Amino acid sequence: MASHNDDTEESGDAVTDGGVVEEQQQTGFGPITKLNERFGSDFVESSQFWLPPFLLVGLFVYGAIIWNVMISLTDFQGFGTPDYSDLDLEMYARALSDSGFVDAAVNTFVLLIGFTLVTLAIGLGLAILIDRNIRFENTFRTIYLLPMSLSFVVTAQFWAWMYNFNNGVINIVLTSVGLDRVDWIGSPNIVLWAVVFALMWQFAGYAMVVYLAGLRAIPDEHYEAAKVDGASTLRMYWRVIIPQLKGSTISASVVLMVFALKAFDFLYSLVGGYRPPNGADILATKMVREAYANLNWAYSSAIAIMLFLMALSIVGPYLYYQYKEGHL
Amino acid sequence: MSDETRTDGGAVSAAGSDQPAGLLAEIDAYRVALYLGLLAILAFFLIPIESGLVTSFKTSTGVSGTLPFAPPTPEVFTLAKWQTAFDALARGLVNSALYAVPATVISALLGSFAAYGITQSNWKPKYKAPILALFVAGIFIPYQAVLVPLSQFWSMVPLQEALGFVWALGISSDYTGVVELIVTHVAYGLPICTVLFRSYYKNMSEEMIEAARLDGASIRRVYRRIVLPLSGPMFAVVLIYQFTQIWNDLLFTLVLVQTESSTAAPIVLILAGLGQSLEGQDFALRMAGAFIAALPTLAVYIMFGEEFAEGVAT
Amino acid sequence: MTDDSDRLSRRRFVEATGAATLIGLAGCSGDGGGDGGDGGDGGSENTDGSDGSDGGDSSGDPLEVLHGWTGGDGAAAAEALVEAFEEEYPDMEHEFNPIGGGGNQNLDAVVANRLQNNNPPSSFANWPGKNLQRYEGVLGEADSVWEEEGFEDVMVQEAVDLHQYNGAFRAVPLGSHRLNCLFYNTSVVEEAGVDPDSLTSVSALIDALETVATETDAVPMTHGMSGTWTTTQLWASTMLGKEGYDPYMNFIEGSPDEAAVQSAFESVAEILENYINDDASSIGLTESNQNIIEGNAAFIHQGNWAAGAFRNAEDFEYDEDWGFKTYPGSEGMYMLHFDSFLYPSNNPTPEKTDTFMAFAGSEAAQVAFNQYKGSIPTRTDVDMSAFGPYLQETQEDFANAEERPPNLQHGLGVDSETMSTLNDVISSEFSGPYNVEAATSGFIDAVSN
């Protein structure tokens, strides 16, 4: 036992059983003990569980982001390898003077906000309807959530067909009630909202599930109290219930925004290529196009970093909120 | 459930039992409207799928000559599109499974490890918090922010050479991309897996674990004997969620496998270009392909709808 | 006990990683995985089917050619090319890998990735001319092929010029399409009382479109602009037809005349605002072309790959049902397009690649490929009897053309980055509403040095 202990200490190997570590703690020698003293008694021993995954994430996620920042400061394009000796902010300046980038940034913003608000509103409506003690609740809920299980690639096929100019369901319905056909995908002013609508179809069920959980967490007494006060149903929801759904709203909107940032898959599949329909270019599609179609590696990295900062400005406050609320 | 009632219909009608009959009729009208509304919404969610399904069974004349949501008449009915789509996508089904299944299992397992190591062990919360924060933030990283380094990384790793013995067996070296996809999906799937498991472990009874620890059981032993056996329900949630995410993802396949012509092309990559060629858009083919690609996740969803809902709601 | 659990979890770990890395080797023992790898690597006598042979010696590797002809005419043409190659070189091992999807973008991405990873194919299909710039530093020399085969004597001068970059030949042409084409449905133009051959200026074309609009129910000019490239190439033909050869060449050479650029845009805007189909922005070339075949439209501007669809349509014959007119104003000119094979440096199979390149420029290859592709040989000494009447006429035009300006949209005239910028301009300023001023300044900025 003792020799085993020595081995462990020499090699700094954390893989050992609890008894040994305790013994070390008592004797108070070695780096493991010091680490444990500083971080807590299980720090080293538990690291065999969390450290490898943490390193993997650290390398692939955070290491890659730092690497991306480095690449975005070079002039890397075409073939070869980036030259890290000459770093500047040229690519960021280029982005700001590129009208295509500005358009894409605006579209990204509109998509984020529009999609999130519309989906939250529809999702809340669905949750309230579902929460009215209806029969077959499970069936309704399952079907409302069903599109969420589909790939963006699949839903893009469905909606390309729904929006088809001559034979799509939507235009057929429009013409049957005497309206003109609309070129949903082809009109630069409309296409972004057509995309928002399709994504809403896919994710309204998600918002519903989150809100439903939120609604059911509200104690029954609150509904009762509102009833006693004579609040009408609508006013009760507006005054009493919805304010209590703040947590659900925040977590749902963060997740929805992240899905909106991933709308690349949808736009790519809609047209089967890197260039989305006119008027629907977002930073996610522009970044991939610049990198893999145009080989502008540094420029696309700079776009990626700005997209990342956009995501961070959404997620950062959310994480802080979670931290303050003690959920972390 | 207590006797305390909510504002739902059942409660109101119960309260209405000692009210005049007119109110009851009103309530019934309200219930009818409610169900009609729910059914209309149901139709809204199903129409794109229904329209796709009927279209997939139509000939090209049928696609342009009949209503998009009407079932195919016998004259325009064909299974040919499904046949063509299946021929094009069958390889993709296998390829997608080749990386989606291992990546799902590995990321769930590692996520469980990580969550356990952070949650059910005794070290200072102020050091746990930043580590946990990095995991949580990892969920929300747009993949674009890591794409260029990712492709740089995989072009630097001599994976294809290292796996030379596999290719020597006659397996196409295109499958290097599949191996890359496994590692990549594990790395980027880990944060969400970890967070899902953490929310579960946080609420796990600590008494049993404490008792075991006091008996001198190692952290590893506690995991194997107590935590892992109790993790079954959460594994179901995580596996289903991860499988759906990995199977459905296009971006990584586009970057790492690149072309639907590759022997190792995943199904989403083939589907993204299916039915769109210089010969024109074949919507029937696209719809049939969409259903074939969706079948695995749909099957998982229909069988494990509850777990899926739990996964997305967390 | 502890040891036991250690071993157990370690085995589980090995199993997990084994599953991840050793696809298809599930039967092997987990422990042997790593060793087996080393062994297989060193003593591989079994390198037959596996491709991706990077850096190895050339003798054993098969010729590997990447191209993007995966559908319809292209696939048939590629097949004919492979057959002809096998006939000529029955003993050479080869892999012709078609890479489909998204126009040529998947092909470009795969090629780029392999060049980036220093794992080039033997050769790949692409455009020569300015397009070669994007492969700066990764292309080798094909000078010896050009010299030995005497290509310089049998190809038109433009082909000789456009296949050189940085002082050496980098590619060999296989075939050529023509860009400045106007196709029409004979019965629709007859119904409207328009004589296409009389249209020798862009303004005459616009007048004819107006006549079609008033005299018939058909769409005067069908246009599919779900991609921007169709509009860019329409602008290029209009620029050439309306303003002439010199202003066009000045534009692609980087010293554009603003008035000429703007005037061309004005004409294109007039056409697009008034004479195209309602669903233009959501359809592509194919559906647009279908309008001609079905008699829903009078005219279409396209490269002559569009004629391939006419040939494949039933009961739709050249001269009887459809006709061709050089884009108005550009008579006597042939706006060039080349399909070529490029020669990557660090070539895995230098000798085989030379052989293949020599073949690609030969009469056998060019006849086999182009008659199916709907394009013409780039050699001027080829027996055209295997080709249909339309392509025979095209070949005569090609051989006798006064000028053969390089195209704008398909790689020859401007480098890929400029082309991408031009398409961004079309996308943001000229996809309806049509902002002539902004598009003009965008185009001028894009090409000006």
Image: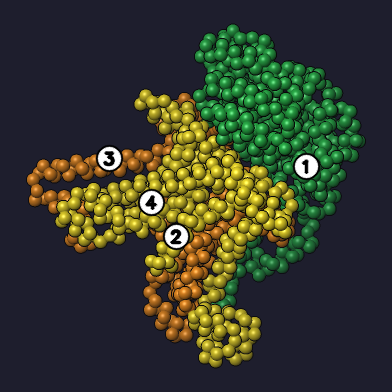
Chain colours: A yellow, B orange, C green
User: What residue is pinned by disc 2?
Assistant: A317
Q: Which tag is nearer the camera, tag 2 or tag 1?
A: 2
Same chain, marks 4 and 1?
no
Cα distance, mark 1 to mark 3?
Answer: 63 Å
The secondary structure type at the circle numbered 3 is helix
Q: Where's residue C8, x and y in %?
A: 56, 75
Residue at x-position 85% and y-position 42%: C141
Mark 2: which amino acid? Answer: Pro
The secondary structure type at the circle numbered 2 is helix
Chain letter of mark 3 equals B
* Quadrant in the picture for residue C134: top right
Query: Number of labelled discs?
Result: 4
A290 or B252: nearer the eye? A290
Q: Which tag is nearer the camera, tag 4 or tag 1?
A: 4
Tell me the number on the disc at residue C123.
Answer: 1
A106 or A129: nearer the eye? A106
